[in-house]
Amino acid sequence: MEKQDYPPILRAGIHPMTLAQIRETFVAPLPQATPRLRMFSLFDQWVVRLRQLNVTGTLWLDGSFVTRKPDPNELDCVLWHPSFAGPVSEESKIDVRSMIDRASAKAVFGIGLYIALPLPTEKMASEAYWRGLFGFQRGGRSAEGCVELKV
């Protein structure tokens, strides 16, 4: 059975936002959607922890979370070029590795995480791929927007 598409909350394109703006846009307007609030809370904890560990990068968020679906399955995101903003301890590196491990991010934080590390010569093609994937709903015909968040 084909999964149902829900109306997108954002118009097509990439929309830079802060964590507070993400909450205002995707959680606050749907107060009856407690799974959405729980999902955002876990995502918020994940981002705050990455920042505490001095990780930098850019996140693109998508999935049923950015639609009007009351009980989204997960928050899909691509983390572009994660790196450290300064010196880091070996312990912090281990923490970060576990946080950006796809299986761990899904199990602990409910995040469908992908890491994008394209070479400069592959950057445009990689961005085009993710724009195509995140810029449309499942059927590939209805455009939707995605969120950009700086870590």
Image (tube, rainbow, N blue to C red):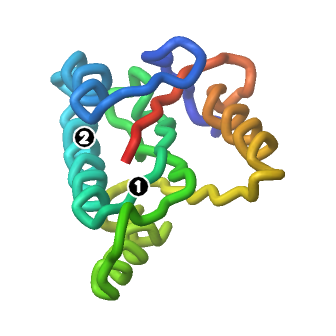
The residue shown at (65%, 26%) is 136
The x, y position of residue 20, in whole percent, is 22, 29
Viewport quadrant of the N terminus: top right
The image quadrant that residue 134 belongs to is top right
Circle 1: residue type: Thr
Circle 2: residue type: Pro
Q: Nearer the viewer, residue 113 or 116?
A: 116
Please report whichever mark, 1 or 2, sits nearer to the chain's N-terminal start: 2
Question: Mark 2 = which residue?
Answer: 35
Label 1 SS: strand
Q: Nearer the viewer, residue 120 or 37?
A: 120
| Tag 1 and tag 2, C-beta contact below 8 Å | no
Question: Mark 1 = which residue?
Answer: 56
- Above or below residue 124? Residue 33 is above
Query: Mark 1 against mark 2, which lies toward the viewer?
Result: 1
The x, y position of residue 142, in whole percent, is 67, 17
Few, some or many C-alpha atoms within 10 Å of disc 2 (few <14, some 14-19, many ≥20)? some
Q: Nearer the viewer, residue 108 or 117?
A: 117
